[in-house]
Image (cartoon, coloured by chain):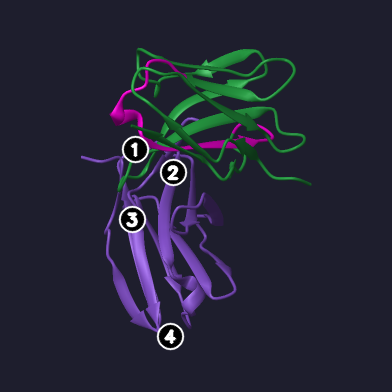
Chain colours: A green, B purple
Amino acid sequence: NAGVMQNPRHLVRRRGQEARLRCSPMKGHSHVYWYRQLPEEGLKFMVYLQKENIIDESGMPKERFSAEFPKEGPSILRIQQVVRGDSAAYFCASSPGLWETQYFGPGTRLLVL
Amino acid sequence: RKEVEQDPGPFNVPEGATVAFNCTYSNSASQSFFWYRQDCRKEPKLLMSVYSSGNEDGRFTAQLNRASQYISLLIRDSKLSDSATYLCVVNNAGNMLTFGGGTRLMVKP
């Protein structure tokens, strides 16, 4: 049973470009979560999604960030017009249901030049 | 005040030592509790869930004190491979994990 998959593992963007991060949950998991870890800091919740629905986006920055989890395909975290402060590790997690253990993917490390 | 607080360390211990980490949380409505382990530049991995009755998994023992809002992790007979950052994690709302800043452990030969 493959774990949570994320790609790309590393992404370099110049200021003003767009970043698209992908996450495929574990088989049988319908709940997806995105977390961000800034350098030398702890992980912070960004958004929680189920298929075709954003359930909780209380941790998402108000501008430039969006997330989706379409009926088919992976969940996407999209960052428009990236700035240097967006440089971080972005981790996706999945679980089979609420209150159940969340399993993390290997993360995407975004570097904005 | 941070919602989940941990001593950042580092804790430098020799192989075979016993080491304990503590964590406090501020939300009295928190429902579930975990210790995750994070190796350098890797993803967090679940070490163990934490229950009010306390639980043990091999060399690892976790305790939860709801009255004091305090969680602990005890590692016995430390191994070099235990070197990592240990994350205290609380689930308040069913969907959002709140992480402490982590406690760094370095086990030396």
- How far is the residue under mark 2 from the one under mark 4? 29 Å
Stretch in magenta: A79-98
Q: Nearer the viewer, mark 3 or mark 1?
A: 3
Image mark 2: chain: B
The crowding category of the residue bearing disc 3, from other C-alpha atoms within 10 Å (few below 14, some 14 to 19, many at least 20), is many
Q: Residue B23 — which label? A: 3
Image mark 4: chain: B
Hey, what amino acid is under mark 2? Val
The quadrant holding residue A29 is top right
Q: Are marks 1 and 2 in contact (CB under 8 Å)?
A: yes
Question: Do the residues at pointers 2 and 3 share their chain?
Answer: yes
The crowding category of the residue bearing disc 2, from other C-alpha atoms within 10 Å (few below 14, some 14 to 19, many at least 20), is many
The crowding category of the residue bearing disc 4, from other C-alpha atoms within 10 Å (few below 14, some 14 to 19, many at least 20), is some
Is A34 contained in the magenta span?
Answer: no
The quadrant holding residue B56 is bottom right
Image mark 3: chain: B
Residue to which mark 1 is pinned: B27
Q: Nearer the viewer, mark 1 or mark 2?
A: 2
- How far is the residue under mark 3 from the one under mark 4? 23 Å
Considering the numbered disc 1 on the image, is that residue within a helix, a strand or a loop?
A: loop
- How far is the residue under mark 1 from the one under mark 2? 9 Å
Residue to which mark 2 is pinned: B90
Hey, what amino acid is under mark 3? Cys
Front in this rendered view, residue B3 or A21: A21
